[in-house]
Image (cartoon, coloured by chain):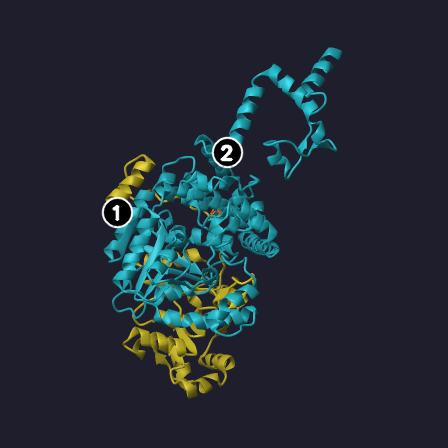
Amino acid sequence: MTMYNLTTDQRVDKALADNFLRQATRRATDRLRNNKYKASDELGNWEEWRNAGETIRKHVIANLDFYLHQLIEQMEKRGVHVHLAKTPADAVGIVRNIVREHDAKNVLKSKSMISEEIHLNHALEEDGAAAVETDLGEYIIQIAGEPPSHIIVPAMHKTRQQVADLFEPIAGHALSSDTPTLTRFVRIQMREQFLRGDIGITGCNFAVANTGSIVMVTNEGNGRMVSTLPRVQITLMGMERIVPSFRELDIMLNLLARSATGQRLSSYTTILTPPKKSADSDGPEEYHLVILDHNRSEILGDKLFRTALNCIRCGACFNVCPVYRQLGGHAYGSVYSGPIGSVITPLLEKDWKKWGHLPYFSSLCGACTEGCPVRIPLHDLLVKLRMRKTQSGHTPQVEQQIFKAYRYLFTREKTLRRALRLGAHLQWPFVRNHRITGGPAPLSNWTKSRTLPMVAPKPFMQIWADLNNKR
Amino acid sequence: MTNTNEFINHLASKLGRPTPIETPPPVEISVPQYRLSNTEERASIFLQNWQALGGKGAIVKSDNDMLQCLKEWFGDLPVTWFKDNPQALIAWDMLPSIAESAFSTLNWPLTRYTQSSLDPRDRYSIAAHAELGITSSDLGIALSGTIVMNSDPLRGRAVSLLPPRHLAFIETTKIRNNLFEVLEEISALGTPPAAIEMISGPSRTSDIEMDLSIGVHGPIEVYVVVTDN
Ligand code: SF4
């Protein structure tokens, strides 16, 4: 996947040069954001719902061990196979084994961010049991070989013509690029797969601890297909995705549907309490639940960042983020993009070298925090992450030197005065209209794309001293 | 694979305390919930919201109303369907009696999903080739225009999923104000059924250029008859 081989700067340049992408991102985020406003305003007391959402999430995370245990007990009591995965590799291994054991040829998937996080599709492809993505957007990017560009509308960066071009080789004939034609094509194409499916893999929006239920929301109905027709089902869940009971589920489902797409409820909200009863005609006989840690337990133990686990993956923070709105998701380079992606990716992946740029993909305007239905202080977490990164010694050499010089000068008054006087002289070749517009490295890193105010010919300290003298 | 106790103890150590033995006291939740004053109002708001989502709906008060309603929606279509496919109408084993008698009066024979074949794949295929899937509905939600169906051995989950059209029957008295009431009522039943399906309108997607498109995987047309005795 080419996207993954580019540097951060290259990805950003690519995004900035792609007019369709930028327009599409703005269109998608505007639409989703406005829908959310409508759906949250109509409740008339959104802040109270947010309060409730925040309280519930905090309570669950503070008692995650208890609720997870309860969930596992409930599930196992009924014969669900529960698998606990410490790492993405463990999770992939578990799914691979199940697929192999059943000698499954037709593996179907509905949307699951965990499957993206563990790069499941790639592994299954290697085994010759590729999982077909059944969500329309996911299907499009699967054929294109790209990661999702938005957590709710993963293929929003593709034009309908590009989609038609991707579908044509599969259709074996030309397709017109109007949406109804494309949708109909997918309906027919996917139908056969659904009817033949051996194993269904799904994500999980919420797991209800006291009943041992899995809640899934979709609008297309693919989630229902994948959880109704195949004989075997595997559900992938991040270990924090829990609610204590149906009582709290009401709040969370309202917040999720309204924040994600502005719906009162998604078209299909399915609560599964698996496996099927023996006399039931439909539904999986064999059910596997894979619960993933992947450093979530580290986040749990880290008081500074624990609130990051409260996320319900609604995407509302993406839609209001000025950085995301300019760049779209691919520039981030990570599976999870947007403000929450910038927070959790470095924490989950624990690799500052690769993901150290993410906390800086933010203007710190706070729009994300304001938009978050469970009140995660996202911009605050981004600042703290910058601090973590600096403490761990991963800032670039130049930046470290500059801040050393800064500390040196600002703790020595005389030297500072001398340096300012010197600067006032040396700057002249680079000053245009009272701004510094060029200069030697490392200054040029800044002036390449911006200007700096010039050093005042008469420093403020001097002006102050003169005023004092005059009095 | 990790052992459960080890996994849970690890979390407890991260939380800096032993795992609680008792269920933690539930958090207090106080959100003002949407409420309507009576059954009639709930039925009418439910219908409005269902229609706003793109579904068709009507309230019927008598056997005759029911016949009129079905005729108006489907006209002679079933007769045409039956020519190609005698199993064009696929239904749950039991429907409300007002619906059963309407179908027999209209002479539109129903294929019962669970009895249509012993082999699940055959059943799926029959349902996928049917023109209309017919079910009842246990509960409804006025605020969101949602029908709620609990799975059970006499009811195929595929009936409301695979055919291109879905028709559901619901009694006015089963329509609740909001999701909270529905979840509360289901909790009270004890262990939930294997699947609770909440359906709000037809299958939809906006995945291509944010352009709304109906019927990508699930039913394209959805109908609800609200029966008021
Ligand atoms: S951080 Fe908040 S706004 Fe962003 S996806 Fe998570 S829950 Fe939604």
Residue A45 makes an appearance in the image: no
Residue in the picture at 29% in, 40% down? B10
Asked whether, in this view, residue B46 is left or right of residue A122, the answer is right
- Residue type at the position of mark 1: Thr
The residue beneath circle 1 is B2
- Measuring 32% from the left and 60% from the top, which residue is drawn there? A127
Q: Residues within 10 Å of mark 1 (few under 14, many from 20)?
A: few
Mark 2, secondary structure of its residue: loop
- Which chain is indicated by disc 2? A
Front position in the image: B228 or B181: B181
Report the amino acid beneath label 2. Pro
The tint of chain B in the picture is yellow
Position of residue B150 measured from the top left corner of the image (x, y, whole percent) = 35, 65
Q: Position of residue B199 (x, y in %)?
A: 44, 65
| Rendered view: A465 above or below B129 | above
Locate residue A212: give its quadrant: bottom left
- Percent x, y for residue A160? 56, 65
Q: Callout 2: 10 Å neighbours few (<14), some, many (20+)? A: few
Residue carrying label 2: A396
Q: Quadrant of residue A430?
A: top right
Do dots 2 and 1 share one subunit?
no
